[in-house]
Amino acid sequence: MGRLVARRALLAVPVLLVVTFGAFALAAASPFDPVKAYAGTAALGADQETLDRLRENLGVDRPFAAQWWEWLTSAVTGDLGQSSVLRQPVADAIGERIVWSTLLCAVAFAVAVLLGTLLGVLAARRPGSLLDRAVTSLAYSLEAAPVFWIALLAVWLFALQLDVLPAGGLTDTGSEHVTAGQVAHHLILPAGVLAVSQLPWFTLYVRQGVGDALAEDPVRGARARGLGERTVLLGHALRSGLLPVLTLIGSRVPELITGALLVETVFSWPGIAAATVEAATAVDFPLLAALTTLATAAVLAGNLLADLLYGLTDPRVKLSEM
């Protein structure tokens, strides 16, 4: 296991270098002007000399490759630079927001995995039954629905029509302190929407995996020995049927991050979504590079976790050969 982690960590280095360089290159090709974004309305009445001086002070007057190299060498020492759009160190900007984004993604992912496993097992027990058709139809419908559409629908139903859940934010309006109860109450809708957006994949994978496992000889032999249906389902078919789901964990991380950005925007959740949008539109090189690196590292970590789980649960797979 240690060798696998070390090998993946070494391979991640060139990937992160290419990704960060690409972020600087795309930002440099962007039609947005970082100086005008920084100055705001004051840039409308400023002369060219003032704008050029501000461009020099921000460090965006140099080629993007030079800016990337300066950011990279500083980032290695722990200095991620200064965000021009948020007017604070990049490390502080990310640190204030990453906790809430992580909370949202973790809760949504856990709910999606647990509920998807339950629905997939129930559907696989009796293929072709009314329950199976209902679960698969629901899964395919949700798979085709954009996450922002589900979010807007949830706001309309639960916040506007039923008035049982808040439409957005982290705490109640006028609250001076952040409490666990308020956070949990405000987390229900965004986490639920994000979980629903991930639910179809886990449901369909579990249904297919458990359904195939129920038709295998070991499971048939367990039934022939007189074992109860619950024991056969949970002790034999489910364990074998969940193996394909483990590989799905890593592949869903990019979609989870993208969905989280949209959900945070709709529900005004104080995560990294707003910072990402502002960094892109304002061509904030240091913040954009740091956020891109963070997202890439999360994807690589998700793939590594999936491989580790697969190797630990499947005796046919050796971690030393991965």
Image: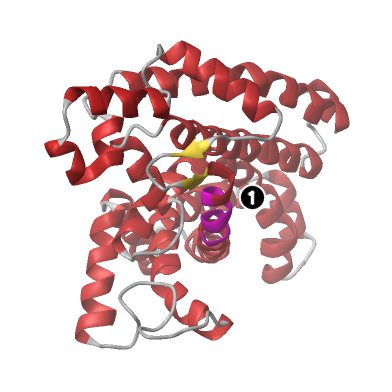
Secondary structure mostly seen in magenta is: helix
Q: Residue at x 57, y 50 (%)?
A: 92
Q: Position of residue 2 (x, y in %)?
A: 87, 31
The x, y position of residue 261, in whole percent, is: 39, 50
Q: Is residue 270 visible?
A: yes
Where does the C terminus fall, quadrant-wise? top right
Query: Front-most of 109 and 167?
Result: 167
State whether residue 16 appears in this view. no
Q: Tell me where residue 129 appears, x and y as whole percent.
A: 39, 65
Q: Which residues are magenta?
A: 93-100
Depicted 65 relative to depicted 134: above or below: above
Nearer to me, 11 or 89: 89
**Is-magenta flag for residue 99?**
yes
Q: Is residue 284 left or right of residue 251?
A: left
User: Dividing the picture into quarters, in which one does residue 235 lie?
Assistant: bottom right
In the rendered structure, the answer to whether residue 95 lies left or right of residue 25 reads right
Query: Was residue 148 drawn as part of the magenta stretch in this picture?
Result: no
Q: Position of residue 39 (x, y in %)?
A: 27, 40
Which residue is denoted by mark 1 in the rendering? 242
Q: Secondary structure at mark 1?
A: loop
Question: How many numbered callouts?
Answer: 1
Q: Viewer-proximal residue, 109 or 312? A: 109
Of the residues shown, which amino acid type is indicated by label 1? Leu
Quadrant location, the N terminus: top right
Toward which corner of the image does residue 264 lie, by quadrant?
bottom left
